Image (cartoon, grey):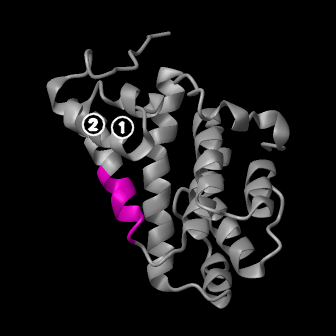
């Protein structure tokens, strides 16, 4: 397997350094994912920019985390499941929602469960949902705009999940209390 460097300020390419500074300001440290992405400054910039854009959607923090964590689970990304569990906890996402996302169990709130289900459909069908899937999502109170925002969140997770798979990104100590494995859920 090809090994990847988890960059810091001393080893990162020059174009990645301002982005790593921004990450340190936001998180208090350079998450290993971002240190790994620094190998390709354009990827790091794209990921950080897209994450900022995703935060501007009409979706709440809990709704955004539902999309992100559903994709993390389906893509079996151990790093991002732990990281987004920590992010969700810090953002005040209810613990029962976080646990449902980590174990692939239904969310008690019907509207949020419709979002979880639709995010899974978009991932599993590679963007080819059935008309009935779209109608169910819209029927739960979401909009056509929200459909496309689910696509945006899915694209964001492709960038991070695939990077972690290829690079075998080591979990940061800050996220270790929320370590996740596929043993917690039936991946079938």
Is residue 43 visible to us here? Answer: no
- Contact between labelled residues 1 and 2, with CB atoms less than 8 Å apart: yes
> Looking at the image, is 36 positioned above or below residue 20?
above
Closest to the observer: 36 or 85?
A: 85
> How busy is the neighbourhood of tag 2: few (under 14 within 10 Å), some, or many (20 plus)?
some
What residue did someone put label 1 on? 24
Left/right placement of residue 129 relative to residue 160 reads right
Disc marking residue 107: none
Identify the secondary structure beneath mark 2: helix
Left/right placement of residue 130 relative to residue 148 reads right
At 44% from the left and 72% from the top, the residue drawn is: 148
Which stretch is magenta? 49-56
Closest to the observer: 48 or 77?
A: 48
What residue did someone put label 2 on? 21
Q: Is residue 52 magenta?
A: yes
At 56% from the left and 55% from the top, the residue drawn is: 68
């Amino acid at each position: 397997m090809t090994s990847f460097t988890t960059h810091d300020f001393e080893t990162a390419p020059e174009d990645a350094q301002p982005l790593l500074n921004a990450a340190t300001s936001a998180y208090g440290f350079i998450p290993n994912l971002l240190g790994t992405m620094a190998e390709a400054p354009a990827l790091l910039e794209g990921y950080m920019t897209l994450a900022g854009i995703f935060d501007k959607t009409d979706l709440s923090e809990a709704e955004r985390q539902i999309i992100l964590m559903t994709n993390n689970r389906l893509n079996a990304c151990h790093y991002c499941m732990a990281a987004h569990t920590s992010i969700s906890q810090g953002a005040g996402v209810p613990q029962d929602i976080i646990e449902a996302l980590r174990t692939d169990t239904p969310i008690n709130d019907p509207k949020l469960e419709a979002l979880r289900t639709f995010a899974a459909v978009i991932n599993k069908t590679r963007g080819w949902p059935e008309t009935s899937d779209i109608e169910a999502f819209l029927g739960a109170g979401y909009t056509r705009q929200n459909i496309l925002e689910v696509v945006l969140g899915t694209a964001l997770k492709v960038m991070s999940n695939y990077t972690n798979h290829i690079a075998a990104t080591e979990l940061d100590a800050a996220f270790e209390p929320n370590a996740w494995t596929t043993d917690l859920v039936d991946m079938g």
